[in-house]
Every structure is written in C-alpha cells, then in structure tokens.
Image: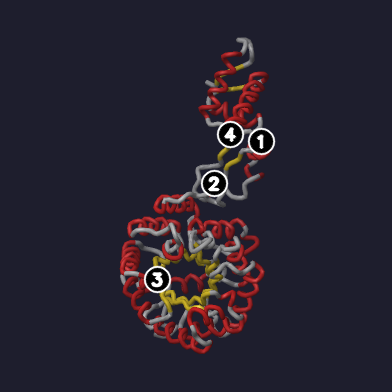
C-alpha cells in the first residue's frame, strides 16, 4: 500500500491545520505499565470512555504482544469506543505487528495505528540490542514497511532519541519515513533532555527530514525524571512537533510522562507564545484525573497543576482579597474550563478579615464592627490550633462570640 493510498485520521487533521497539535494519550499503555498503576479491562474501558469525552486524538490502548490479556483489552477498547484513533505499541518485529493488527481489528481502518519502536542510542545499541547502526537501520526499514502494508497509520519511535547521535537519529527517522511511517516520534525515554535541547533537536530534524517528507508529523514523548517532561514537550512544539504524547496525571514509567492536562492547558493559556491549537474538551480534565485516581486507587497531590484540589484554592488574605476584586489577579485559567465548579476559598490562619466576613455572610451571618473583630480574633485562634476552618467551625465560632456578646452590639442575621 503506497503512502498516497493510505489516508489516516491524523494525517487529515495535520493537513487541515498545520498549527494543530495532536494529543496522543498513553495512560492505558505507558501509564498503566508503571508500578502501582496496572488496570483491569473494565478499568481501561472506563478510562477510555473518559478520554474519548476529553477529545484526545489518539488513545494508545496497550501493548498487544505483551500478553493475551493486553491484546484482548485493546480489542475491547477499540471495539467499544468510537471517535479517537487507537494505537498499539509494537517492538520492531513482525510478530508484534501482527498482534497489534489483530487487537485493533474492531476499529475503523483509518482509526488504527501501529506504533513501532526501536532503540537508537549507543548504550541501547550495544548493551540491549547488540546491533550495529546498519542493522538498526535495516530493522527499522523492514518492520515499518511491514506495518505500513497492514495499517493506514504507522508511527515510529526512536527509543532514547535524546542520547542518540543527532546525525544517526536523522538517518533512523528518515528510514522510517521512507518505509511509510507518517508520525516520527522523538522520545526522551529517560528524561534526559532540557527544553532548549528539545527545541533545537526538533528544529534540526524538521530541517533535514521535512524537505523529503513534507507531510510527516513529528511527535514528542517526554519522561519526567528531571521534572522537565511538560517543559520539554512544549519546547518540542516550538521546534516543530505537532503531536505530544503523555498521560493523565503524568503517570508512567519511573517519574512518569508529561501530564496531558498540563500540556493542553499550557497550549491554550499561552497560545500567544506557542501559536498552536488543541481540540480537547478541557472541561473533562478533572473528571479524567479523578477517574484515573479511582481506578488505580492512587492519590492526586493537592498542589498538582490543573487538577489538584489546591489548583484553584486560595487561603492567603492578600490573594483572597484580590480574587474577590477580580479573579484574574491570581488565576490565569478559569476553574470551570478544566472541570471544577469554581474557585475555592480556604479559611485558615493566613486568611484575612474580609474573607471571613464574606464566608460568614454566605452562611447567613452578617458581621460588622466589633462583632466581626471578635469573630475574626476567635477564628485566628482556632485556625492556629487546627489549620483549616470549615463551615461548621466558623458557625461555632460565631455562636460562641454571639453568646458572650452584649445584646446591643451590632449584629445581624441575613434574612
């Protein structure tokens, strides 16, 4: 099957908008294979439904050759979910590619992607593969061509790309494109790169390969070993990448992958910087995060960007005052845009008098003058003891002050 005859959904997306970044979610593959995140078929299906609603372009549903169970999970996901492209990971051999073909058979032809990978770095070539550079190139050409004979959509990943010699990496990716790969993934498999290196590497590869393969899509797959996965992914976009791979909540091998929710909102919030668009329905991000939390029984850190409980919570008095004046003083995104109901004011020892008065009023108590001063003093004392003051605690403080106050002190109850 020639490149011209193969028309994949992602190729159509890329052709329609050169600034569109394809979101490739690997929660069910790279994320799920990490310790502590294994999912049953039912859990994978539940996550796949949410990812479909989120509007990710590609769902990497698993690694078909890893086990009969994984092949069956991919088959169920590809057969029961409609909309996204479904990918199955394959090592660079025909047996793995055959397993991916079987697993993805229920999906429409244009929505099946075979994701072939082979390591290219010197350490992998010598220690793991025991292959020469010529053997690596020959294997890439043979297996990608085989995959392209079966799939409309083929992605090739040069594992450990950022520890690969740039010239050889360009050779390897060119070989993959020559053999029929439409998407060329440049993975920072061990989280080694820095943002400037990522930008430069993608720009270099784009300059060498695109003149020969104008329709190729460069992809970024970054791990978070140095805490730079999202930064490197965004830098890759600056260098020409138009697909970003990652996982919900940043789960994945070792320190994880780029967090898809952070990538989506960074591209949207800083469109002025990146000049790129995404089609994801971001209001489903919190739901996706919490669904993953539930099916894997893991905790989301309160300070997790975008989806953590504190992402739109405010305790400091200065911040709360600014938020009451105009939310844009301290929030660069609207909480509703990611799936929260709204901003949340946490009452604690850092909160100011104004925020306490406002919360009391919302609970039906209008505090003014000395009464507000007395309640605020009691509030501060209790906050030093227990930290966060919830509505029940605040009501109790108001009641205690009311009981001990002279009857003529200014106090009212909202009617």
Dots 2 and 1: beta carbons under 8 Å? no
Separation of marks 4 and 2 at Cα, in angstroms: 15 Å
Looking at the image, the residue that sits furthest to the front is 127
Mark 2 — residue? 302
Which is nearer the eye, 171 or 124? 124
Separation of marks 1 and 4 at Cα, in angstroms: 15 Å
Where on the picture, by quarter, is residue 267?
Answer: bottom right
Category of crowding for the residue at label 2, using alpha-carbon neighbours closer than 10 angstroms: few (below 14), some (14–19), many (at least 20)? few
Q: Residue at x 62, y 10 (%)?
A: 406
Where on the picture, by quarter, is residue 317?
Answer: top right
Query: Where residue 353 appears, x then y in whole percent?
Result: 66, 29
Mark 4 or mark 2: whose residue is earlier in sequence:
2
Please identify, in this view, whether the residue under mark 3 or under mark 4 is nearer the observer.
4
Mark 4 — residue? 387
Please identify, in this view, whether the residue under mark 2 or under mark 1 is nearer the observer.
2
Mark 2 or mark 1: whose residue is earlier in sequence:
2
Mark 3 — residue? 88
Please identify, in this view, whether the residue under mark 4 or under mark 2 is nearer the observer.
4
């Amino acid at each position: 099957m020639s490149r011209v005859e193969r028309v994949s959904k992602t190729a159509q997306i890329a052709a329609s908008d050169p600034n569109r970044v394809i979101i490739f979610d690997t929660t069910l593959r790279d994320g799920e294979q990490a310790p502590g995140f294994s999912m049953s078929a039912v859990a994978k299906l539940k996550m796949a439904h949410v990812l479909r609603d989120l509007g990710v372009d590609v769902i990497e549903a698993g690694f078909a050759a890893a086990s009969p169970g994984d092949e069956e999970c991919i088959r169920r996901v590809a057969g029961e979910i409609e909309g996204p492209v479904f990918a199955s990971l394959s090592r660079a051999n025909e047996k793995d590619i055959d397993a991916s073909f079987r697993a993805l058979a229920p999906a429409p032809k244009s929505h099946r992607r075979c994701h072939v990978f082979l390591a290219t770095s010197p350490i992998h070539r010598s220690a793991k593969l025991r292959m020469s550079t010529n053997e690596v190139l020959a294997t890439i050409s043979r297996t990608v061509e085989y995959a392209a004979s079966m799939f409309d959509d083929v992605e090739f990943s040069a594992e450990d790309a950022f520890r690969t010699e740039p010239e050889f990496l360009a050779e390897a990716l060119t070989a993959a494109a020559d053999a029929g790969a439409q998407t060329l993934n440049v993975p920072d498999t061990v989280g080694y790169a820095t943002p400037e290196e990522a930008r430069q590497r993608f720009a270099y590869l784009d300059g060498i390969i695109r003149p020969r393969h104008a329709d190729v899509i460069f992809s970024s797959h970054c791990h978070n070993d140095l805490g730079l996965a999202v930064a490197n992914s965004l830098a890759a976009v600056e260098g020409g990448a138009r697909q970003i791979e990652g996982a919900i909540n940043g789960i994945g091998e070792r320190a994880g992958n780029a967090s898809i929710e952070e990538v989506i909102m960074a591209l949207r919030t800083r469109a002025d910087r990146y000049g790129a668009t995404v089609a994801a329905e971001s209001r489903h991000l919190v739901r996706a995060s919490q669904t993953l939390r539930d099916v894997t029984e893991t905790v989301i850190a309160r300070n997790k960007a975008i989806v953590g409980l504190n992402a739109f919570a405010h305790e400091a008095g200065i911040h709360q005052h600014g938020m009451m004046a105009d939310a844009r003083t301290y929030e660069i995104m609207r909480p509703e845009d990611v799936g929260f109901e709204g901003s949340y004011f946490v009452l604690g020892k850092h909160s100011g008098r104004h925020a306490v008065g406002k919360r009391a009023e919302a609970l039906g108590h209008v505090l003014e003058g000395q009464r507000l001063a007395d309640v605020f003093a009691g509030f501060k004392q209790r906050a030093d003891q227990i930290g966060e003051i919830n509505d029940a605690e605040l009501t109790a403080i108001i009641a205690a002050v009311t009981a001990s106050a002279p009857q003529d002190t200014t106090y009212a109850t909202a009617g």
